[in-house]
Amino acid sequence: MLGKKLIVQKYGGTSVGTKERIMAVAERAVKTKRQNNGVVLVVSAMAGETDRLIRMAGEMHENPPERELDMLLSSGERISAALTAMAIESLGERAVSLTGRQVGIITDSMHTRAKIEQVKAERVRQAIDDGMIAVIAGFQGITVDLSDVTTLGRGGSDLTAVAVAAALKADLCEIYTDVDGVYTADPNVVKNARKLDKISYDEMLELASLGAKVLQSRSVEFASKYEVPLVVRSSFSGEPGTLVMKEDKDMENVVVSGIACDKNQVKLTVMGVPDKPGIAAIIFKAVAEKGIVVDMIVQNVSADGSVADISFTVPKTDSKGALEITQSVADSLGAKTVIIKDDIAKISIVGVGMRIHSGAAARMFQTLSDNNINILMISTSEIKISCVIEGKYSELAQRELHEAFGLGKSG
Amino acid sequence: MLGKKLIVQKYGGTSVGTKERIMAVAERAVKTKRQNNGVVLVVSAMAGETDRLIRMAGEMHENPPERELDMLLSSGERISAALTAMAIESLGERAVSLTGRQVGIITDSMHTRAKIEQVKAERVRQAIDDGMIAVIAGFQGITVDLSDVTTLGRGGSDLTAVAVAAALKADLCEIYTDVDGVYTADPNVVKNARKLDKISYDEMLELASLGAKVLQSRSVEFASKYEVPLVVRSSFSGEPGTLVMKEDKDMENVVVSGIACDKNQVKLTVMGVPDKPGIAAIIFKAVAEKGIVVDMIVQNVSADGSVADISFTVPKTDSKGALEITQSVADSLGAKTVIIKDDIAKISIVGVGMRIHSGAAARMFQTLSDNNINILMISTSEIKISCVIEGKYSELAQRELHEAFGLGKSG
């Protein structure tokens, strides 16, 4: 085993979307193996397959039982894992496909959004020791008593890859996707967006939470916790991608590493709430009890201090439920009215450099102001600043901030 | 539980082939349940799904590894089981889909053709006790150490249903298919073929082995062994179907119950084999070692007793392999030549009445002779007589024998 590296490669739905692409995945795995590495693959369902299954479920039941949904959806990854294993065998290497249960990905029993409690990975280790390539069906686990299949939620295959890499103490976890890596901004919006060679876990986590779709945030959290070196790269180009790793000195020299934009939130404002202690608690307890996750919260008190306006954002998909419950709470509190605004965008700048360099917030606000973009809400953390603005300005704001923080390609 | 019946219903691929049909299956299950019965469903993959998966496997590997094939194909039944459970829930009854592992269908590890060693069915029993409808993914099992998924071979879902019915000591196992029941002959060939109200296990077993496709023969064997009352009926018409049960007195009054025809065999003849003891053993040992199953065997000795001709039949799919090995053995034995004939049909008459009524064989041979149909081989058992004839006469022979044994509708 001396000198041998253990590499986990994760392939998304597009990367295994056709027989030719599955064959390309198999070829890369075989090549990596023949360079004297241990290789573990994690595959998603073939592109379109999960949607097909969800559509069929919707035809059977308005609101399909989640346990059955997990049984159904987990089949998609089993299919691509088995096909990928066959493709590898056809190239002359031995392979074995493994389900969540066979890998020993033990989760809680929250169907459709289960949390990983333990990864045993004994069979994966055994397969590698036997000189085989293990092909793991992503996105799925099994309950603690080994009775029922669970799934890990959207982007769950990323999490499978990182969790397995952590359990195996892999040297590298490569996330193959349809983009070249992590960019300073969305290249579809900002023309001269630049691919980052490396980024810290913390920054990646903020970017993922803030709307950058390249990695699922739970998997970044997991990678950070277990210090799994992650690479995000394209399965179509041969480009080296972006390394997501522990923060180093270099990273602090840059104030802002990237810009993210999230257009999937709505803003609710409860106007004229009596400004008494405990009012905010009443509102947000009621919203939380509906299972709705609140992101940003801002409260303004009126000039005379008698009433306050409370604004907060929730995911667009929860807007109807959030409005109903907020309206009913507002009525009982004697608030004036509830306003919902759905054409908003949350623009964020992220960088570990903010920890030691000041002035990032001021420069962000100034840039928006220079472009006549009104800021509706502000929220900050140690390494990010988010502003909610009107949705129609989202592209302009991204381009101007990208320019203002000098993120573009030098060429 | 007093007065409550336990009913296992098995639905084939056509019966769950579309969302409308899955919904119809759910409706029948719910209706059966609400008539105060315990209900267990066993479902096949949706029609076309297994073929789709096999085609994809073939695109990945010329000869896909069987373990991976099982992982792949078992997904088809998981999908239809989950969808059926959802459909049942949408109708207001509780349902749970269960895989081979979850049911506890323990098999040997012969992938793609595993044999059932044990059926635990604890979770099925629990589900029924909890007032739920259990929906079992057919065709699949799990190895003894619970490590790998296996499949039970073609028609395996019938076997799943019968094995589960046996384990649960179910009152009835209904096999829903696209025909109304078991017929005296193939209705596509014999216009006035009649549906049988009941048939004995032994007769059904012979018919299934002899080419009647309505039930898989291993499942009939299993039903017979554990005396599971089977009903074969249509999932589209409301007809009562055919009851497959223990032989009773009534059945013996009929000499012949049905006629079967198998056109999927070829006949090999080794000409001019030295007629010495042990020659047949040498030939059939060699064929068996290739995993080829020989059906009928006939040996003729020449007038002077010096040489013999040995004829036997094998499945059409094995004809190439059988010819090669037979040719090579024939050469080493100094036999004259090997002839293969593939345009043959095996016509069989089946009936438990043959045990006590004589003359069936004579009437069969006479009928064929009257129609100038030459008999190439004959084989008999206690309750059946099979004749190999030229393939082109197969339809004629079925019609004439059906008439000769008075099997047609009286009307």
Image (cartoon, coloured by chain):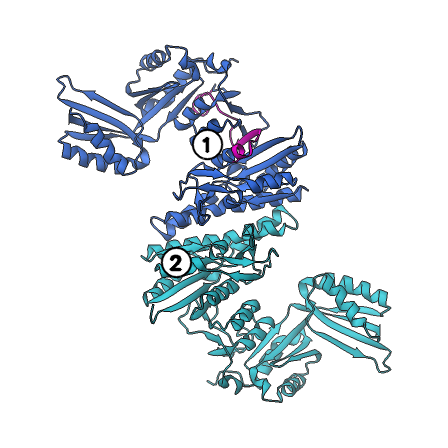
Chain colours: A blue, B cyan
Q: Chain of mark 2?
A: B
Residue at image coords 22%, 37% = A325
Q: Residue B250, image x and y in percent?
A: 49, 85
Say which quadrant the N terminus of chain A sits in.
Answer: top right
Q: Nearer the viewer, mark 1 or mark 2?
A: 2
Q: Residue A133, image x and y in percent?
A: 62, 39
Local SS, label 1: helix
Q: Chain of mark 1?
A: A
Q: Which mark is residue A219?
A: 1
Residue at image coords 14%, 35% = A332
Q: Is residue B391 visible?
A: no
Local SS, label 2: helix
Q: Is residue B110 left or right of residue A368?
A: right
Task: Check the image and report above or below for A5 versus B372.
Answer: above
Task: Check the image and report above or below for A332 versus B138.
Answer: above
The lab-note entry on whether marks 1 and 2 share a chain reads no
Residue bounds of the magenta highlight: A164-191
Q: Is residue B280 left or right of residue B403?
A: right
User: Is residue B391 covered in magenta?
Assistant: no
Packing grade of label 2 (10 A; few <14, some 14-19, many >=20) is: many
Task: Check the image and report above or below for B143 versus A142.
Answer: below
Residue at image coords 65%, 76% = B393
Task: Check the image and report above or below for B88 versus A384.
Answer: below
Q: Amino acid at mark 2?
A: Ala
